[in-house]
Amino acid sequence: MQVRSLVPIRYFTNTYQDFFTAAMSTTVQSQAVEPIGFIGKIKAHIEILDPVTWISVSPCLAGGVMASGAMQSSLHDYLMLFALFLIYGPLGTGFSQSVNDYYDLELDRVNEPTRPIPSGRLTKQEALWNWGIVLAIAIILGAWLSLHIGGQRGWIICLCLFSGLSLGYIYSAPPLKLKKNIMLSAPAVGISYGVITWISANAFFSDIRPEALWMAGLNFFMATALIIMNDFKSREGDAKEGMKSLAVMIGPKNTFLVAFVIIDMVFAVFAWLAWGWGFHILMYILLVTLIINIVIQTKLYSDPQKGLSFMQLAVDDGFGHTIGKSEIHEHNAFLRFQVVNNILFLVNQFIAAGLIGMKYMTV
């Protein structure tokens, strides 16, 4: 999920030039594709928006709203909440996923040949229409919401939304193509999924709470660490295409180590913040969580293939449709770790968000 308006004009200019050029083109693809029918096309258009990824922004959005302590039980606020999840889920995150598929066709032929474009279920022109329309809807809805809220909060929401959209585009699109280098791609994902979502969700219902800024920072580093390990799945294709993921540059073992250190620091800082905010019970819970995570990380680091194997059932049959499946040992180990780590982190995050919100409800 991703958004922004300060991106140089040339990116959006080039985007719309490509969009209308492809839309008006009558060039027939050289490869004949068996028709899949109207329903099949609709499913392919939805698939390219990657609905599973929409869920990833939900915890931060929910946390930001809870921490505001200002949402009312009214039809207006419920509609605002729906609009918030719509613009960051199907529209924002969906846009970034569609753009990614459009520009990564050759890479997906190696890594994910069943995706809509490489499988032939969508042409590149159809994919261009897909993310072009989604982008237009996101911009219109985002502008309206910013004006509706107004004031400083409206400007904050506008900046967050359009910054995320811009990041979603330049992450995959040339000439910048941030995903080519992990030093740019991981922070971009961290900002889009962790920072922008927390801050704008908070601004939807209240002035920005100082604690919300800290929570946004924690989510930035957590998302960064997870995206580093998620690159295990495309290591082979990344190496062939010259993508500088950490798994390609330093190998899976060292990549695990870097990611685990970042995650442990997140939990440690989270515990320190909880103590400073007066949430002492939460601090003890976070310390226990940190110990559990370190034990799990040690097992996975020493044996990525069999470590934490008791969680494999959860990946295959429980969370498989949400977090994905993999035949690559290191990526499969990451998925097993992700199930435990994300549950632990999200539970603590929601407790913290609730306590922050309660604090401001009494002011």
Image: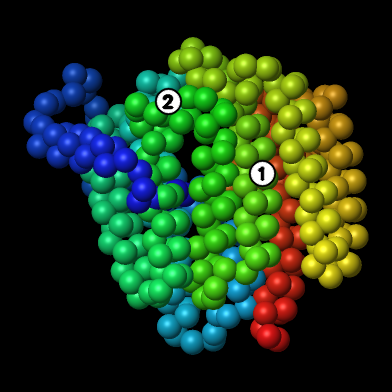
Q: Earlier in the sequence, mark 1 or mark 2?
A: 2
Quick check: 262 above or below 250? below
Quarter location, residue 140: bottom left
Q: Which residue is mark 2?
A: 108
Image quarter in which the C terminus is found: bottom right
Q: Are marks 1 and 2 in contact (CB under 8 Å)?
A: no
The residue shown at (75%, 67%) is 351
Asked if residue 46 can be seen in this view, the reply is: no
x and y percentages locating residue 162 in the rendered image: 38, 53
Is label 1 in a helix, a strand or a loop? Answer: helix
Nearer-the-camera pick, 57 or 275: 275
The residue shown at (54%, 85%) is 72
Q: Which residue is mark 1?
A: 221
Task: Name the side, left or right, on which 142 lies relative to 53.
Answer: left
x and y percentages locating residue 283 in the rendered image: 86, 61
Quick check: 127 above or below 160? above
Quick check: 147 above or below 234? below
Task: Name the side, left or right, on which 225 lies relative to 189.
Answer: right
x and y percentages locating residue 139 in the rendered image: 30, 57
Q: CA distance from mark 1 to mark 2?
A: 27 Å
Task: Name the side, left or right, on which 134 lies relative to 272.
Answer: left
Three-letter residue code for mark 1: Phe
